[in-house]
Amino acid sequence: MARTDRRSPWRWLVPMVCLVAGLMFATSHQASQGSDLRSADTANLADLVRKAERDAASAQQAVIRLQQQVDAATHRAATGNSAVATAQAQAKPLRVPAGMAAMSGPGITVVLDDATTVPNDPAIDKNQLVVHQSDLQAVVNALWAGGAEAMSIAGQRVIATSAVRCVGNTLLLNGRVFSPPFQVAAIGPAGTMAEALDHSPGVALFKQAAGYYGLGYTVASDDAVTVPAYDGTLKLGYAKAAR
């Protein structure tokens, strides 16, 4: 009786597995270009963010030092050049409204903070437990409307080009990142600014959320509010040589 030729499935399965593995190794090598695809430097996003923040802080300190050198050189030039001295005299009254000088005086301080506890209710949207961009903008707009003369958020001077932007529960302001609580300090008539806060629809919504979800919201008058000078870079839209 003739013997039946039963071919094992491994005779074609093993070569196919080897072929697929070879293709995968080749693709991985091509993508990595010889580097580790999951190295510690690229896999740990938190470390990358912290490094970027340190680099940004170091660059900002370099900008401050260079600006101090420019100011010193400009001051020296003014002592022997009447044109420079005249330009400085014309610019000096504009430094305060432009935010280039620190200010101190009576005013108001508003602090907004995320909820400190998470309610034990699965139906609650966790997005309601953090301070949002619209909340900060409502406070800032109300304070300006109430007569604020100068303002800072998280210790950063707010000027005409400052934009209040939030990503998640972090604030992006003047090229820096801040975490809650967010302190808004404004110099000006405290009573009028407090009244403007009370009449702001956006602030009213946040106060309601604060009462329901446990968000932080405090307002305090102060006879000695201090806001720093703006220490960031100023972008020139256009410039031309003086003749």
Image (cartoon, rainbow, N blue to C red):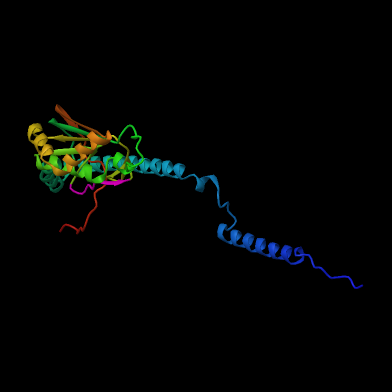
Residue 148 at least partly seen: no
Is 232 left, or right, of 219 in this rendering?
A: right
Dividing the picture into quarters, in which one does residue 79 lie? top left
* Residue in front for this viewpoint, 171 or 149: 171
State whether the magenta stretch is mostly helix, strand or loop: loop
The residue at 56%/60% (across/down) is 31
Say which quadrant the N terminus sits in. bottom right
Q: Farthest residue to the top: give it.
A: 223
Q: Is residue 163 magenta?
A: yes
| Residue 111, placed above or below residue 133 | above
Q: Can the viewer see residue 172 in this picture?
A: yes
Q: Residue at x 50, y 48 (%)?
A: 42
- In the rendered structure, the answer to whether residue 159 lies left or right of residue 114 reads left
x, y percent for residue 40? 54, 44
Q: Is residue 196 above or below residue 83?
A: above
Q: Position of residue 233 (x, y in %)?
A: 26, 47
Quick one: 89 or 97, which is closer to the camera? 97
Res 91 quadrant in image: top left
Quarter the C terminus occupies: bottom left
> Magenta span has 55?
no
Front residue of 91 and 229: 229
The total number of labels drawn is: 0
Q: At 19% across and 41% down in the image, what residue appears?
A: 205
Q: Is residue 42 left or right of residue 15?
A: left
The magenta span reads 160-167
**Residue, far right:** 1
Picture quadrant where residue 230 is located = top left
> In this image, 167 relative to 227: left or right?
right
Q: Residue at position x 58%, y 51% from top?
A: 36
**Residue 143 horizontal/vertical position (percent):** 13, 39
Judging depth in this view, the residue of 42 and 195 nearest the camera is: 195
Residue that lies at the very extreme toward the bottom in this rendered image: 2
